[in-house]
Image: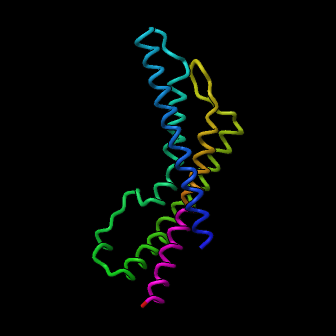
Amino acid sequence: MVLIRLIDGLNEIVGKAVSYVAVIFAGMIIYDVVMRYGFNAPTLWAFDLTKMFFGFYFVLLGGYALRHQAHVKVDLVTENLPSRPRQIVEVLGYLIFFFPFCWVFVTKSWEFALRSYAQGETTYGAVQIPVYPVKIAMAVAACLLAIQGVSEVLKLIFKQSEQRHVG
């Protein structure tokens, strides 16, 4: 199905692009440590900036992780079920728990991001870095996670119908 491929592809691209952020913030930490302990000249910006990059990294990988089934999953009940009942339980789990959570995550993170942007929120300290980009990333991540959930449910549904047609 085109929608599944589109959503999976989007989260795959975002996941791979965001993985480079880990290299960037690791480099910034190494730079700060070398400057601080090697030259006794700590940076004013490295701590806040690495926190922000880690925030981008952490939140934006939610959809990618769901796509690759890397989230924690308690399958004590479903592991012993036959295929069709397992798929039904998994779809119900998405409908009852995942999508309501995503709705709250999307709506509240957008409110959070818009308020931060409207206030011109910055970090406090020697260097004031705008905070709203990370909060906007959180809202985007919530949307990516929600649409990946749609993809996962569609995969479960189509897997069911494929099995019925094959047998």
Magenta highlight on residue 153: yes
Which residues fall within the magenta stretch?
Answer: 147-166
Q: Residue furthest top?
A: 40
Q: On the rendered image, what quadrant is the N terminus found in?
A: bottom right
Magenta highlight on residue 131: no
The residue under the point 60% across, 50% down is 139
Residue 85 appears left or right of 106: left
User: Which residue is nearer to you in this view: 21 or 139?
Assistant: 21
- Percent position (x, y) of residue 4? 57, 68
Q: Relative to residue 24, is residue 32 depicted above or below?
A: above
Residue 77 appears left or right of 145: left
User: Which residue is nearer to you in this view: 69 or 12?
Assistant: 12
- Percent position (x, y) of residue 17? 56, 45
User: Which residue is nearer to you in this view: 9 or 127?
Assistant: 9
Q: What is the quadrant of residue 166 in the picture?
A: bottom left
- Percent position (x, y) of residue 140? 61, 51
Q: Main secondary structure of the magenta part?
A: helix
Q: What is the quadrant of residue 127 in the picture?
A: top right
Q: How many marks?
A: 0
Q: Residue furthest front?
A: 166
Q: What is the quadrant of residue 89 in the picture?
A: bottom left
| Rendering colour mode | rainbow
Q: Relative to residue 44, is residue 6 depicted above or below?
A: below
The residue under the point 50% across, 78% down is 157
The residue under the point 55% across, 68% down is 150
- Percent position (x, y) of residue 28? 50, 26
Q: On the rendered image, what quadrant is the C terminus found in?
A: bottom left
Q: Residue furthest right?
A: 118
